[in-house]
Image (cartoon, rainbow, N blue to C red):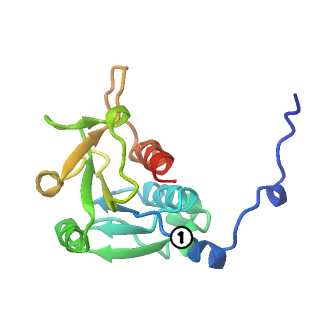
Amino acid sequence: MHNRKLLNIELGRVSALEYKQLPESGIVIVLDNIRSAHNVGSAFRTADSFKIDKVWLCGICAVPPSADIHKSALGAEDSVEWEYVPDTMDAVRRLKEAGYTIVSAEQTVGSVMLDKFVPSPETKYAVVFGNEVSGVSQEVVDASDFALEIPQFGTKHSLNVSVSMGVMLWHFRLHKL
């Protein structure tokens, strides 16, 4: 078994221009008042990794250009399309009008466990990730088509929002390839 690490030039990475020409995934993410610019940067990097179509930055989210975003995004803020909207509900309304199914990444009374959810390849999804302390706002949860919850087995019952994005978006892309 050969376990040599691959060199960067062996990874077959596309350029930012080539990235923008790749087919759309039918998935966008909405950041609902994420307070940490580092978490916003992680969102861009994760979105780039899974070829998410757009990042919607809402409320108190930092926006590019930002040294703190760039520190975790590593340039993904230049490849992934993004838009800033002051009120998350305005972004949700616009996405609903554009035919997206709105999914809150949140623990709710009626949430669906992620391992039980199979995304439809034909459906466009907008996945909302919430504030590091208060989560997705109740107003946005109420406006969502449903909530998805990541099964957890420890004592904390919460994950850092950037970790949640990685888990959720990998799951969506696994089923929408």
How busy is the neighbourhood of tag 1: few (under 14 within 10 Å), some, or many (20 plus)?
few
What percent of the width, then of the height, locates residue 112? 25, 37
Residue 123 in sight here: yes
In front: 85, or 110?
Answer: 110
The answer to whether residue 132 is left or right of residue 140 is right
Of all residues, the one furthest to the front in this rendering is 122
Please determine whether, in this image, residue 165 is positioned above or below residue 14: above
What percent of the width, then of the height, locates residue 153? 37, 20
What percent of the width, then of the height, locates residue 113? 29, 33
What percent of the width, then of the height, locates residue 129? 32, 52
The answer to whether residue 47 is left or right of residue 14 is left
Q: Looking at the image, which residue is at 54% across and 59% down?
A: 45
Q: Looking at the image, which residue is at 36% across and 51% down?
A: 120
Q: Secondary structure at mark 1?
A: loop
Of all residues, the one furthest to the top in this rendering is 154
Disc 1 target residue: 23
Residue 57, picture quadrant: bottom left
| Quadrant into which the N terminus falls | top right
Please determine whether, in this image, residue 2 is positioned above or below residue 78: above
Please determine whether, in this image, residue 54 is positioned above or below residue 151: below
Q: Looking at the image, which residue is at 43% across and 49% down?
A: 172
Q: Looking at the image, which residue is at 33% across and 20% down?
A: 155
Three-letter code, disc 1: Pro
